[in-house]
Amino acid sequence: MLQGYAVVGLYLLLSFALLGVVLLLWWFLRPKKPNPLKLETYECGVQTVGDAWVQFRAQYYIFALIFVLFDVEAVFLFPWAVAYNQLGLYAVIEMALFLLLLLGGLLYAWRKGALEWA
Amino acid sequence: MVPLTWYLLVATALFCIGVYGVLARRNAIAILMAIELMLNAVNLSLVAFWRYLHPTATTGQVFALFVLVVAAAEAAAGLALIISIYRNRETVDVENIDLLKG
Amino acid sequence: MELSWWAHLWSVLPEIVLVLAAALMMAVDAWLPEGRKRELGYWAIGGLAAALTVTAVQAAQLAGGIAVPYEAFGGSVRADLAAMLFRVIFLLAGILTVAISMDFRPLRQSGEYYILLLISVLGMGLMGAAVNLVMLYLALETVGIALYLLAGYLRDTPRSAEAGLKYFLFGVFSSTIMLYGLALIYGFTGEIAYARIAQALAGLPAPAVMAALLLILVGFGFKVSAVPFHFWTPDVYEGAPTPVTAFISVASKAAGFAVLIRAMIEAFPTAQANWVAIMAALAFVTMTVGNLLAIPQRNLKRLLAYSSIAQAGYILIGIAAASPLGVAASIFYLGIYTLMNIAAFAVAVIMTNVTGSEEIRDLAGLSRRSPGLALAMLAALLSLGGIPPLVGFFAKLLVFAAAIESGLLWLAIAGVLNAMVAFYYYIMVARAMYVDRSPEEEKPVWISRPARFTLWFTVAGVLLLTVLVYPLYLLAQMAAQAF
């Protein structure tokens, strides 16, 4: 079993070695003309202004939270869907109740203005 | 196959990194991330235990699913509290959050 | 045994009532105009009272032998008298808390507050009934998340926001450590149901079980604020809105004890010698540290925080006794403690409304300013201190007797000594009310009608139970037999 991984390891080494050879080759072949323009984020494009560490609007965070919550609830839907044929009516009713509660939560968030963009 | 011990070692290591993060970091968001790391360590060990020792019943998997959902809810509540601290104090550094002296 | 769908629902009927009430309140809250949010308090009391009625009927059926205890939802929850009695404690605490919240100025009425409170009560009910690890964790987190948000509910008050964040970080950290212990238990045994875990653990090496047990106790220790895990308590109690503090100090603590008792007795009987030693040590450290740190406090909420840590220590004595008498004593103590602690906090809420601060010196002259309020506080304090004839004395007597019966004489003696220390700081508060004078004695104290209800209910409850000690004890004993 572990010998099977040895092949993978060999490939890994080989690919690193190849990369190294190519980079070295370029180092010798390429002309060296350092230029501050080359260090710009966009060599030919809009000049960058300010810092990348800016604050986002707080509204993003409420959307993100609501998204994460509903996204994770979907976790329960997958096993339910897979086992659907063996579960019968009981599970259908239970899932309907679950989704109904979630819908209630969404409506509440909507009504409370959590989905407004302002 | 990779033995169970390896999984458990990784899980323990992750958990300890998480504990270290909670104790050593000062940024509240970093602490929250460390706690998420701990939760993921638990999930890893749950799933490994299930797969190797108790594969007949799906208990371990189901447990892990619930942990996942609780983690999301925790993160939501935690971020809300951190935002409200930030609005009050302009900082999320737990060293500076010291109005209540204990 | 195949259960009927009704039997499944019956086991969590109070929770179903609470879910419906919370959903209804969300709908009402979304459409109620801004100025009328206070009415939601009455909705909340209605929902909690409905659930309480259901629970009382169920408890009566179980106590009278009309219904038999059973496990529902694939062994997730048990319907037994202990679960029902704990629900009564949570629901009562919820109703009384809503009543003191309704006119608490800083809260500036809004609907989410009451809905979160309802949801945390719901989670507590499940905590008391949980008999497997997944249910235990889910219920614990439901309660936790709702309470973190409640503690930080006053978003514009830096102290409240800070209390919320601290409570959250400590709570999530300790519950995650506990979760790791739960995962280990699952790994060792392959089971999540308490009864089967107990069977499977019998053949396992003791150190492994011990490691998992210690991890789990971190989470429980946090919930009941036992001493090495108590650091959050004073800060959160001081910073959280006072009604929320009252609720955390009684209901959340009682829920912590409910899961602690059930898990220790049902899942870890084979490790009993170990956890009895741990509980005895925890009890000793908790009451001693709580009482000693309470003495220098000048803030009423911080004083009550340390006092509630010490009270947790006394309750732990009953669990350390690990006998039917011990468990009965702990349940008895928790019931009494709920009433007397909420009474004390109700006075704190009323005084915060009047003076805007929570210092003990602001109680000066209260006996002349509002004799009734001072008397209520006095009754609560004396009962918390365990002064005979009040019912708090019997609660202490029971846990000490349980300790002696189980051969923990040293713990009982330590408890008595601690009770004497505690007496000192309770009397200091009483002295401020009765001896100290203040220039504001002429100003009347405004008490809203719901808060008046809480005061009357709790004080009357303490006095009434002083007379009815024996029936209450019998009830606690019957509940203890469930384990």
Image (cartoon, coloured by chain):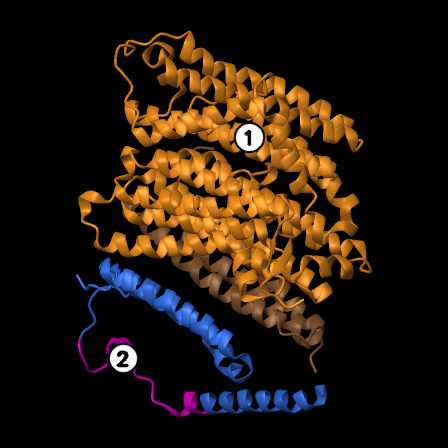
The span shown in magenta is A25-46
Residue of label 1: C336
| Chain depicted in brown | B
Foreground: A47 or B4? B4
Q: Which colour is chain A painted?
A: blue
What chain does mark 2 sit on?
A
Left or right: residue C313 versus residue C273 is left
Are discs 1 and 2 located on one and the same chain?
no
> Separation of disc 1 and disc 2 at Cα?
76 Å
Residue C169 drawn in magenta? no
Q: Residue at x 43, y 28 (%)?
A: C457
* Left or right of A15 on screen, residue C371: left
Q: Which chain is orange?
A: C
Q: Residues within 10 Å of mark 1 (few under 14, many from 20)?
A: many
Residue C68 or B11: which is nearer the viewer?
C68
Query: Does the magenta portion include A31?
Result: yes
Expressed as whole percent of the image width and height from the top left, the position of residue B75 reads: 42, 59
The residue singled out by tag 2 in the image is A38
Label 1–label 2 contact, CB within 8 A: no
